Image (cartoon, rainbow, N blue to C red):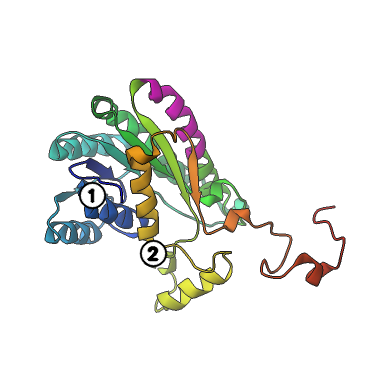
Amino acid sequence: MSDMKNQRVLVTGSGTGLGRGIALEFARRGAILAVHYSQSSAGADATVKEIVAAGGKAAAFKADFREVAPLQAMAREAVAFLGGLDVLVNNAGITMNRAFEKTTVEQFDTLYAVNVRAPYFMSQAVLPDLEKSHGVIINIASIHAFQAFIEHTVYASTRGAIVTLTRNLAVELAPRGIRVVGLAPGAVPIPSHFKSSPGVDMEQAIKEFGKSIPCGFAGTPRDVGNIAVFLASDESRYIVGQTLVADGGTTSWMHFSEDFKQPMTAQFGQGYVPGV
């Protein structure tokens, strides 16, 4: 297990979901956490409380990432609390599925502001501190950056932008001692995914997700947290500019077959060539 003892870590969007899982995993390994949230403080406060109750150190910081100025102010406050910065995890993001022709300018601009502009200028805001510590930037992307899905033109393109940003920023900052990497999770069901469907059985939903994933199960926030810790550690020091895909085999599956568990010959006969 990677030792993060006394590492100073800022995780954006860490009051709920993936960000919470990432923050808690860093804390379990001994890191000091700055927990960011954008709207309700309830999730961030609960995350901080859990970390402190376990003997760790953490504090919550608010900033609306739709604008740059609040983001920059929050970065200064978080770094002051931490006494410097070793790891930045750009996790905060907004997801949206909307038909192409129904997507508004406001929706487009909001997703790009939070999902692309915010991590760009957050990384810029803490650059001097990461340069001092020879720190790490981890950009959270998504498998939507690598495979297309209906009604995801805006969201997926923001995730593709993060993969490209990771690659380019890594090359520019590596000579200055800062390592930049990306992490693209696959299906990780969290309560916010079902906010429009009250009363949904989370355990059953997770089982359903698992049926369409080659490994047979969906990921968890802790799974993502474990990988984030690895990417922040010296154990991955030779990984630079790459975005690690963690999806249970989802993007490795060629979707010409209706059921990845059945041989192609059983469904189409001998000699079938997908796409020809």
Q: Nearer the viewer, residue 165 or 270?
A: 270
Residue 166 inside the magenta-drawn segment: yes
Q: Earlier in the sequence, mark 2 or mark 1?
A: 1
Q: Is residue 42 above or below residue 19?
A: below
Tell us which disc is closer to us: 2 or 1. Answer: 1
Q: Is residue 181 left or right of residue 233?
A: right
Task: Say what amino acid the circle numbered 2 marks.
Answer: Ser
Task: Give the residues drawn in magenta, as a range.
Answer: 162-175
Residue 84 figure quarter? top left
Q: Residues within 10 Å of mark 1 (few under 14, many from 20)?
A: many
Nearest the eye: 9 or 113: 9
Q: Residue at x 77, y 65 (%)?
A: 264
- Secondary structure of the residue carrying numbered label 1: strand
How far apart are the two marked residues, 2 and 1, measured between alpha carbons?
18 Å
Q: Residue at x 25, y 36 (%)?
A: 86
x, y (%) of residue 46? Answer: 20, 62
Element class at badge 2: helix
Residue extending furthest toward the top:
175
Q: Which mark is residue 192?
A: 2
Q: Magenta residues: mostly which secondary structure?
A: helix
Q: Residue visible at 22% across and 52% down? A: 27
Residue 135 falls in which quadrant of the image?
top left
Q: Is residue 46 left or right of residue 252?
A: left
Q: Name the amino acid type tagged 1.
A: Val
Q: Which residue is mark 1?
A: 35
